[in-house]
Image (cartoon, helix red, strand yellow):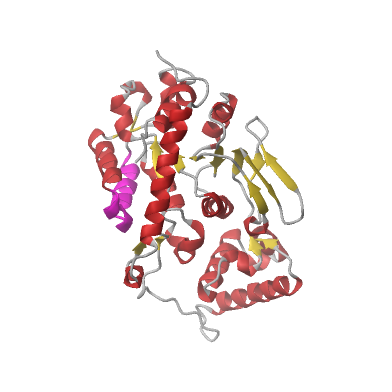
Amino acid sequence: MAFAPMGPDASFFEVLERHRASLLATQKRDSGEPPDRLASRIDDSAGLQMAPHCTMRKIKSDSLTSVQKFALILKVLSMIYKLAQSNTYATKRDIYYTDSKLFGSQTVVDSIINDISCMLKVPRRSLHILSTSKGLIAGDLSYVEEDGTKVHCTCGATVAAVPSNIQGIQNLITDARFLLIVEKDATFQRLLDDNFCSRMSPCIMVTGKGVPDLNTRLLVKKLWDTFHMPMFTLVDADPYGIEIMCIYKYGSLTMSFEAHHLTVPAIRWLGLLPSDIKRLNLPKDSLIPLTKQDLIKLDSVRRRPYMSCQPSWREEMQIMADSNMKAEIQALACLSADYLSRVYLPNKLRFGGWI
């Protein structure tokens, strides 16, 4: 079996530079589109948008069905006012524990904060409310956090946690030629163990450990806005992996009012593609049959409005549906233990194997 070279050669960077130039040209062209394009539910430059005539929910102080929700909104608003006045920040968890008995659950607090953010039409961070980060970052990147802490990410086993206050970080420095978003923490750690980040340096790797939290999405967006480097996703070849990729690229329904601050439509699907399963002749015992729930999710993703402008994605999902099989990234290990890091990803990046 032929393995890729230990490090990227000049042709590898030429491919990425051509892709970067294409992304910048597309962005410049799209910025000149007439304003009426923004009336659609999908904006190619931002992802999901709120529908102009969506259903509104009314909360009244004199209604028995909503008086408790109204009171909780007022309580959270008063806390937001104090945070803004003192120019301090709190996490959603902090707010919940100020009166856990009153709120009942963290989900209630999360819902109220989203409602307030949507109602005031401001990003959540403008409310001085932060989310606890779960994402990780590694590679060629350094920055200064709001409190002055200098962070130097590395390609080694020691990775940096995604900051809780993305808005506050500054002095971002990198020579990275691309950013790889990895769906799962286990795959992220395996790539680090295999020295993928070092061998393909300069690059950056990020994982949201599954469905990404707000801070991970904000960081990816900030890196795109600052450096406009090519960005790729590595997800499982299953409906939920595709949905996670869509969250980074187009946004989520619950946060559609913040799409402009969270999405990077320039993100490309690098792998694992359903077509790769047949192309690489992965053994059948490494594949998993689609469940009924998988099929429902796949149909739901295929029907989303942004898929109308992604024919290649629709073809891949059709391949998945026709085969009735899915595969995790780890299935590549049946070819060789380090096939993902030494062959699959380097060749995909070198020969433009993304869609």
User: Left or right: 51 with respect to 109?
Assistant: left
Across and down, in percent, residue 200 comes to 53, 29
User: Left or right: 23 with respect to 228?
Assistant: left
Residue at position x 47%, y 56% from top?
A: 263
Q: Quadrant of residue 85?
A: bottom right
Q: Quadrant of residue 48?
A: bottom left
Residue at position x 44%, y 47% from top?
A: 244
Q: Quadrant of residue 256?
A: bottom left
**How many tags in the picture?**
0
Q: Is residue 241 visible?
A: no
Across and down, in percent, residue 152 comes to 69, 41
Q: Main secondary structure of the magenta part?
A: helix
Residue 53 lies within the magenta run: no
Residue at position x 39%, y 35% from top?
A: 271
Quarter of the N terminus within the rendering:
top left
Vertical position of residue 337 compared to residue 84: above or below: above
Q: Is residue 225 visible?
A: yes
Across and down, in percent, residue 288 comes to 35, 30
Q: Residue furthest left?
A: 322
Quarter of the C terminus within the rendering:
top left
Across and down, in percent, residue 35 comes to 35, 72
The one nearer the camera, 232 or 251, is 232
Vertical position of residue 318 compared to residue 282: above or below: below
Residue 309 lies within the magenta run: yes
User: Left or right: 165 with respect to 309?
Assistant: right
User: Left or right: 153 with respect to 288?
Assistant: right
Q: Residue furthest top?
A: 1
The one nearer the camera, 157 or 104, is 157
Q: Which residues are magenta?
A: 291-310
Vertical position of residue 268 compared to residue 63: above or below: above
